Amino acid sequence: MKSKTTLVILVWNEIDAIKELFPLIPLDAVSETIVIDGGSNDGTAEFLKSKGLKVYQQKHRGRGNAFIEGLKYAKNDKIIFFSGDGNEDPKDIPKVAYWLDKGYDMVIAGRFILNGSQSDDSDDPLRIRKGGNILMSWIANVIWDTGVKDAINGFRGFKRSAMVQLKLDAPKHEIEIQSTIRAAKLGLKIKEIPTHELLRMGGRRKTTAGTFTLAKNLGIYMLREMFNGKKF
């Protein structure tokens, strides 16, 4: 049964990946699919338009801003954010939609620790990024009782009402841990499901998602959440 959910595909110069990925995306599992494009100049936006999808050009760069703008454009009361780089498994889109339909405010596809989960460590041979993500997720759980093993993965879904309550404002990848922490602060219903992170199908990891850049920015936002309480 088709879920009354909007799937928001996030892209930025992903032409190689999106051509391979697109046939695998279960568009029939949701009632609306839109694209937020971060300013592609490699034909990504044109390709997705040719497939009949509505493509919105981001007004402000950054993954967080893509979430915020996606909320504005989505028509449904449930929204799933999915990256078009090939890392995220499209087979899990219906699973995220299922748990949103079951009444959860936020559903996270977790790459770590959960049975059946797996991360793509192909460009992280020393597992530095993986270890750092697990550590920060553990810290967030200790401080805010998130109950989440992977607080930092962007493959997730929200009820619209929950996103509005969270008042998210992180412009880049920090929006993921910000949304996890704030949802825990407000006592929202969070569900985490295991996902198998796939190898990238093309392109390179964005510089804003680099291990040390991301770690620094996540740390800043975690400190910010420690001081602002529920005043957001």
Image (cartoon, grey):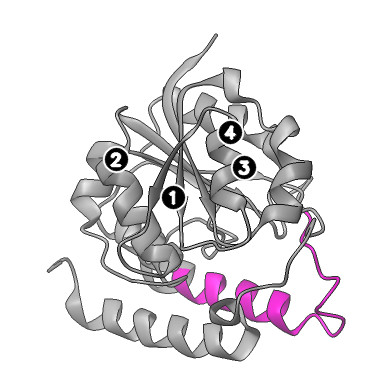
Sequence order check: which comes first, mark 1 or mark 3?
A: 1
Q: Choose between 83 and 218: the one closer to the eye.
A: 83
The picture quadrant where one finds residue 87 is bottom right
Q: Which residue is mark 3?
A: 47
Mark 1 secondary-structure assignment: strand
- Up/down of 177 relative to 51, above or below: below
Looking at the rendered structure, the kind of residue marked 2 is Tyr
Looking at the rendered structure, the kind of residue marked 4 is Ser
Q: Choose between 185 and 28: the one closer to the eye.
A: 28
Q: How many marks?
A: 4
Residue at image point 57% right, 60% down: 153
Q: Which residue is mark 1?
A: 36
Magenta segment boundaries in residue numbering: 118-140
Distance CA(mark 4)–CA(mark 1): 15 Å
- Up/down of 184 relative to 49, above or below: below
Q: Which mark is nearer the camera, 2 or 3?
A: 3
Distance CA(mark 1)–CA(mark 2): 9 Å
Residue 123 placement, left or right of 17: right
Q: Where residue 185 sits: x, y (%)?
A: 28, 60
Residue 158 placement, left or right of 43: left
Q: Which residue is mark 4?
A: 50
Mark 3 secondary-structure assignment: helix
Q: Which mark is nearer the camera, 4 or 1?
A: 4
Q: Which residue is mark 2?
A: 73
Query: Image quadrant for the N terminus?
Result: top right
Q: Are marks 4 and 3 in contact (CB under 8 Å)?
A: yes
